[in-house]
Amino acid sequence: MAKIPESTIEEVLSRADIESVVGQYVTFTKRTGQNLFGLCPFHSENTPSFSVSIPKQIYKCFGCQKYGNSIGFIMEMEKLSFPEAVKYLGDRYGVDVQWGDDDSENTKNLKERKKRVMNILTDAAGYYYKALNSDAGKAARDYAAKRQLSNETLTKFGIGYAPDGFDNLYSFLKSKGYNDEDLNDSGLFTRSKKGNLIDLFRGRFIVPIFDAFGKIIAFGGRNLGPELPKYVNSPDSLVYKKQNHLYALNFVPRNTKQLIIVEGYMDAIAMHQAGINNAVAALGTSFTDSQLRLASKYAEEVVFFFDSDKAGKAAAIRATNMMLAYLKRMTGIKIRIRIASVPEGKDPDEYIKTYGADSFKSVVKSAKDVNDYLFDRAYDDNYDKDSGLDLTKYQEDIITYGSWIYDPIKREKMAVLAAQYLGARAETILFAMEHAEKAAMEASRGNEQRESERKEKTEVEQRRTSAPVKVPNADRVTRDEIELFVRAVRLGGVLADETKIERNDVIRKNDFSGSNMKEIVGFFLEHFNEKTGVSDALLITKMSDLLLNGLKAETFYIKASEQISRESNINAEVDMYKRTLYNVRLKKSQDELKLVDSLIQTTEDKDKREEYIELNNKIELYRQKLIEKRNKL
């Protein structure tokens, strides 16, 4: 993990208040004291179990058990690494985040590697673009002419050509000084049977893929003959995750209110050429929640076009299910979803060429709201002109689709309309939809819980085997020790109030047995503020790389915080803190006495024995003082 100064992380957490950060994704429906509640963005639910604690600056879901601070929340939602999430929040809340040296051997050069990959992709785009206009590129130019792509469009989108051959691009980039490791990182090459790097794109029409800021991050290649596959696309790489991008988003005006989303980048290119400049394309075989979230940052409405064949219809249903489930969880994201169908089974590119851009815009205007689309699909998919409507299959589909609709009014409307076909009461159909929703949620929750447990187990094992252990049982912590730390954190600035707590009664690293717990306490004392103490949000950041009793430290700490009782007032809290402190120190001194007694019994050196006896007496005296102080509470 790249090192970011702890002071910077602390500033980010202080500015990126948890209510503001989470509120971008979740609508809070209830406030209890200083806790906010809403539907969890990480799993499906009808009753809010997702809580945000304003004083602690952390979130927790009591359903799926996920928790963390603002940084952890953004890591989950935006699929970012820790430093990327800190930078993301820093940019949003006005904190200058600089990445320092890297402390991980595996990732210390990650930033430089990404920079070299970006340079490789830029040079490759120049190579492909030049090849398009060479003698070898005639077939690609003919294909562009067949698709009626103008020279202006070819230039705007950086269209190119990958010549036939296994090492054309490889030789070109090697001549530019790039090494095989960097070339392998770029996603532009595959391996031969002998293990050599060979060009991924060969004899193909090349489309550069840009991020939202116009930087080239990948390529797509379309064949120019009958060979399969028709399309070859860059794999995910250091700089490219296809599920997080929308093709041509960099060409969309920033003041647009609507995005038209098509399945292929050739459709998007043709639409831009026709003057429809709010068109983008999904990358990959299915639309993702990350792409929907990205779209919601740029527009208030999305209109989807799916292919009219069987595969396209299946893709439309999958995407609709995903989007509705996602928006049900992400109550803070507001975006209207509509689904359009191109007449005559044509694709958008073909339709525009035949009927013109204005006619296509009329098709966009006629797009159906997602609930109306699902209602019609249930009927159309199960209607046969000879045998009529298959009521059994229609009932199955309408109940399934209705269970996806999270708007109660739209769901009821669907049930009322379906009742006319099924000959049943709308209330009965509505009940069946709600039952199907609950069953799906239970199944999803079970899968998520198993996956979460599997990931946590894997992560713990990886940390145990890869993280350096400073001393045996580095993550060991006793029940009294974790209670002591929890109570110290709860006291906040009171811990520094010498009228309530003597300086000698402030926790110190040596009160704890395991080195991980000592490291956490050291961090706590280093960042302690005499007025406010140290926030849970900042502590969780420190705990993210440590284990306590075989569990992730933040998991162990938060569970302990929930289980340890809160006292009725601050004086009672102080007394419980002291009582726990004295118990911890008495236990530690008892262990020391056993060790010293053993040394007294085994040493043959008279002077050493006298030293040990004297030390034994000092420990006994110390223990008596602790007992006296505890008895006064």
Image: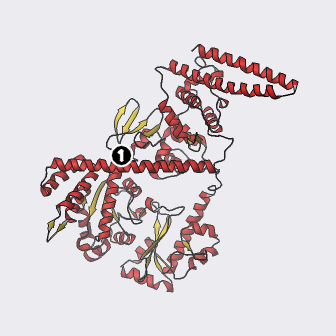
| Amino acid carrying mark 1 in the image | Gly
Q: Nearer the viewer, residue 211 or 347?
A: 347
Q: Is residue 353 left or right of residue 210?
A: left
Percent position of residue 414, x then y: 19, 53
Q: Residue at x 58, y 68 (%)?
A: 184
- Which is more toward the observer, 364 or 319? 319
Q: Quadrant of residue 121?
A: bottom right
The image quarter in which residue 600 lies: top right
The residue carrying mark 1 is: 332
Question: Quick one: SS at disc 1?
Answer: loop
Q: Is residue 433 above or below residue 18?
A: below
Q: Residue at x 59, y 57 (%)?
A: 111
Q: Position of residue 62 (x, y in %)?
A: 41, 39
User: Is residue 300 visible to us here?
Assistant: no
Q: Nearer the viewer, residue 253 or 415?
A: 415
Question: Which residue occupies 36% across, 52% down?
Answer: 326
Q: In the image, residue 489 lies at what x, y percent?
A: 55, 30
Colour scheme of the rendered structure: secondary structure
Locate residue 307: give its quadrant: bottom left
Q: In the visual, does 97 lie left or right of 150?
A: right
